[in-house]
Image (tube, coloured by chain):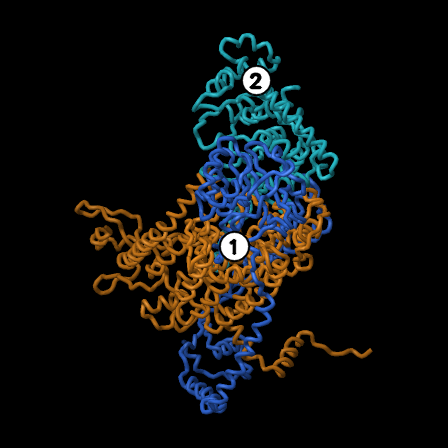
Chain colours: A orange, B cyan, C blue
Amino acid sequence: MKRRKIDIAALPAKAGAEIDDRLQVSSPLRRLFNKVFPDHWSFLLGEIALYSFVILLLTGTFLTLWFDPSMQEVTYDGTYTPLKGIEMSRAYESSLTLSFEVRGGLIMRQMHHWAALLFMAAIVAHMLRVFFTGAFRKPRELNWIIGVLLFWLGFVEGFAGYSLPDDALSGTGLRIAHAIMLSIPVVGTWVATSLFGGEFPGHEILGRLYIAHVLLVPAILLGLIAAHMGLLVKQKHTQWPGPGRTDHNVVGIRMFPGFAAKAGGFFMLVFGLVALLGGLFQINPVWLFGPYEAAVVSAASQPDWYVMFLDGSTRLMPPWEARFPLWPGHHYTLPPLFWPTVVLPGVLTMLPLFYPFIEARFTKDKRAHHLLQRPRDVPTRTALGAMAVSFYLVLLLSGANDVIAYKFHISLNAMTWAGRIGLLIVPPLAYWLTYRACLGLQQHDREVLAHGVETGIIKRLPDGRFVEVHQPLAVPDAHGHTELPYAGWVVPKKMNRLGALVPTVKGFFFPIEEPAKPAPQEERPVGAGTSREEITSSKK
Amino acid sequence: MSFDDSAGAAGPPREVRRGRLLAGPVRKSRLRRRVFAGLRLAAALAIVGGTYTAFAPGSQAQDTPKLSDAAQIGKRQYDQSCATCHGPNAQGVEGRGPSLIGVGSANVEFQVETGRMPAARPQQAQVERKQPMFTTAQAQQIGAYIQELGGGPQLPSGENLRAGGDVAEGGRLFRVNCASCHAFSANGGALSSGKFAPSLEPSTDRQIYAAMLSGPQNMPVFGDNQLTPQEKRDIIAYIQYQKHDKDPGGFGLARYGPVPEALVIFLVGMVSIMFVTIWIAGKS
Amino acid sequence: MSTDTDVDYDVKDPTLSRFDLVKEGARRDGVEIVHYAPRFPKPGTRAERRVERTIALLFGLTGLLGLAFVVAYIWWPWEYQHGTGLDKFYNPVLGLTLGGSLACLGAAIVVWAKKLLPEEVSIQDRHDAPDLDERALTGATIMNMVDETGIKRRPLLKGALLVGAAPLGLAAAAPLVGGLIKKPGNILFETAWKPANGNLIKVTREDGSEVRPEDVSVGGQATVFPGVPHGATNQHADSPVLLIHLRQKDADALRANLKNVAVNSEDGGAMWGNYVAYSKICTHAGCPASLYEQQTNRLLCPCHQSQFQITDNARPVFGPATRRLPMLPLTVENGVFVAKSDFRVPIGPGFWERP
């Protein structure tokens, strides 16, 4: 037999050459490999959302193999005893089958649901990071807009998924959604009737929600996520200010291998977390809720957390109904439900969408920015953000106010009133507090830059006064001044940040390195004390 | 006619009501019902009148011998611990406690066995379950006394009132009748102005049965005409089944729906992932 | 930027090391590797071996837990049984093994990246200044495209294009809208309680059995449905009713209040004896308002906490609801409850056309 000569080691290079002959990918591929990413924990929040989305696609695909969105009435005859012989829809029955009769189906369902909650939580965390650091400024306004749309699409996608199993909570949620549609002036009844195919609940809605949930919305999400990432690659990541970092460069590590390895590892860690949550914490036990029946409701009927703030706004809304006697004998109604569930989400979409432009207009800032801002350095924006967050939190807590009332023995009516008043009082208060906190932090930064770090060493002067010795951050110039300009980045405020403490010895049971030697005596921060009197007094 | 019949608590058995769709039994039962209703009215009048004469001042001495042994022990307990608010002969004290004539032993047993009575602070929004002051036997004796005073709904005998209950049927009835206040998990829920439907976690079969029968505080009454004894057993069977069932998905988060799930995703999910991000991006 | 960025390497120069080539490639991509150092300058130290062992251990755990997952998936008892048998732990065991395996894999990769890959600081130029020459060239190309079509100087074609495209756009939207759209008609104004063929609709339980006055105890309530086929199913989601048997004094209070609401008092009043029936569908958002407090006579909706006063024609006394729960006019025929008529006002949440 003729032995063919194959040099295994040369194979990849040969294959690469063959591909490059045909596609000429060397240059773009290398540019991708060499792309520099800055390294900071807060830049990983968006990645959590991305990985959750991938997990959602994987587990969701598994679920579609068994789930049947039919509203046809069937009698349950599965293994779960407490529902045996109960009339239910095929959708609910198939959810039970997935949970009890498909091996491993329950963990898939639970992972899917936890991943959905994590997806939305990561989106919100990522949005807050982008907002508070000013990463949405020019040239990234478009990516911010895409991000806001992704949040609302995730919201719709999540609500559709929550509605699909046709358990009592799903049905109650859908009924409220129906009422929300009805509340829209002029066209409300037409919208509701058209989407539900007639009376509530009808036989159409689950099928329609299903196709929206597994095809329509995910496809748009996927497209927008691709655009989001494409813009990120094109515009390059923002970075924190720091040594050597300017508005015209990116300082970090190249994408391959370092960054990609970290990202890949992080994906696995997020996946692991979702699997742990899915295995250890029961979520959405549809078998306990029972099938949806129009006459059945449970105390503590809540939506998932990302919808809860709208439930809260609905609960807090005072009973204000507008009636329009347009012509004799014809009165029209604008129900109170319209404001917290249609107008409020509309405002909450539009305000963030246009925020980058509003801010640019107010600050008259038309330049492009690639360096991030510390929240303290932009007190107005930070305070506005805190106001929005506190507004949201009051609504979120009000969405759970019956559970809070029950668990903490508070009157339900008192909770509602606390929410109503809190919604008016807490956001301005948060604005004021945050604004003051930002100013205080700014001032402290400047003070440390001017006068140095407090050492905790108290010195008695010859005239009997006591002063605290400060370690200046810079070498004194010809005039003995040590003041440094603020660089927009963290100012060290503790001595061990300056390396005054001996580094810890590595190794748990025994040292694996030579213990580091203590810092030489002359580096100790004692000498610079005498000219410090004014500084200590200026502290007040 | 005995006391309990006349009080109107015991309805026709379930089969009779279920068979109403057929013409025959309907007529028969309706006739029977009317006769019964008439008898009940007469008996009730007789009891009220009788009770009145019996407890009219000065006649107590002649009345006491009519009580059974258990009721006599119960009366002693009653006089010690209950009479301050409900009056010496359970006729009630204006502004302190309602009359107990006609509430039946089911009510008494429920209130005393769950520790709600004697109430520590009757003025609060709702009297809550606490460590009972009396044993089950004593509660039954007081119940017997109140029963013999004025009649009212009574519990069937025995501790196990879930036997023969159909769990699935019970679940269906639970969701229609009970879940709205006690929540799908029977863990309870808030009502208006500080009132609440309590968790059924500590409730025994007899207590659940008694609560349905007597409608304590703000809970509606589910008389035997509305939920037959069999249906009550179904419901109890379902509640106890769920209590002793596992949470197949892992830690059940108190079976309280999306609120604890929201806590978990932030306190467990987001917090742990934040530590991971700090570790990944941190200096090595 | 360091000086060697100006040097143009001859890539084929055999004296160049591989890392020289890497740096040259990076330079051409606008990236400068300013700091590059191995984590462990001296290979094979104790510290390095320790890191390697850690990573190896993590990979080992990944495989072990992955295997455990497969074993548990196949052999752990998983079928549902009542009580707390071993099947209780099926899901947690799957989660622990799968999650543990994935987390170990992730940790191994991250430790590798953090502890073994060389320390690196690279600087990439953003090239974010717009190239105005390029912009001018592209702009001219685009404008030329417009000129080539000549649409500006051919108004007839401009008009014709509009005339042609607009209807086609409508045609694209028509099937979607046309297929979905459905006239509301009077479905929001009618329920299954509307008398059919002159027969009053019976009040029934979920199983279809009739309801008699004595079936609901004083201080009791029952969820009842119209006695029509599938009356208790979601086909008639607008029809569930809460039938309440009031205490004497509460019933008297309600009777006295009936006149406050015209529709509740007409035709001899909507109550029958001490019984009253309210639509269970909340007038706020449509949840079943069914948390009946029999002493305070309040009805609470668990979704948004609207509270209705039973003894005052279900007037909303707290929460976001603005309208009373509609009363179902009750009467008794042959000893069983029937509805005298449909609800006299539309049930459920408000809508634009609601009078």
Depicted B110 relative to depicted C165: above or below: above
Residue A405: where, in percent of width, then height?
A: 46, 41
SS at badge 2? helix
- Say which chain tag 2 marks: B
Type of residue at label 1? Ala
Residue A226: image quadrant is bottom right
Residue A486: where, in percent of width, then height?
A: 31, 63
- Say which chain tag 1 marks: A
In this orientation, which residue lies closer to the viewer: A347 or B261? A347
> Farthest right residue?
A1
In this orientation, which residue lies closer to the viewer: C290 or C139? C290
**CA separation, marks 1 and 2?**
52 Å
Name the residue located 49 percent from the left edge and 11 percent from the top edge. B57
The quadrant the N terminus of chain A occupies is: bottom right
In this orientation, which residue lies closer to the viewer: A277 or C25? A277
Type of residue at label 2? Leu
* Left or right, residue C230 beside residue B261: right
* Left or right, residue C285 beside residue C215: left
Pointer 1 residue: A179
Pointer 2 residue: B149
Residue A328: where, in percent of width, then height?
A: 43, 58
Name the residue located 51 percent from the left edge and 12 percent from the top edge. B56
Depicted A82 relative to depicted A524: above or below: above
SS at badge 1? helix
Residue A94: where, in percent of width, then height?
A: 68, 53
Residue A365 visible (yes or no): yes
* Left or right, residue B23 beside residue A172: right
Q: How many dots with numbers?
A: 2
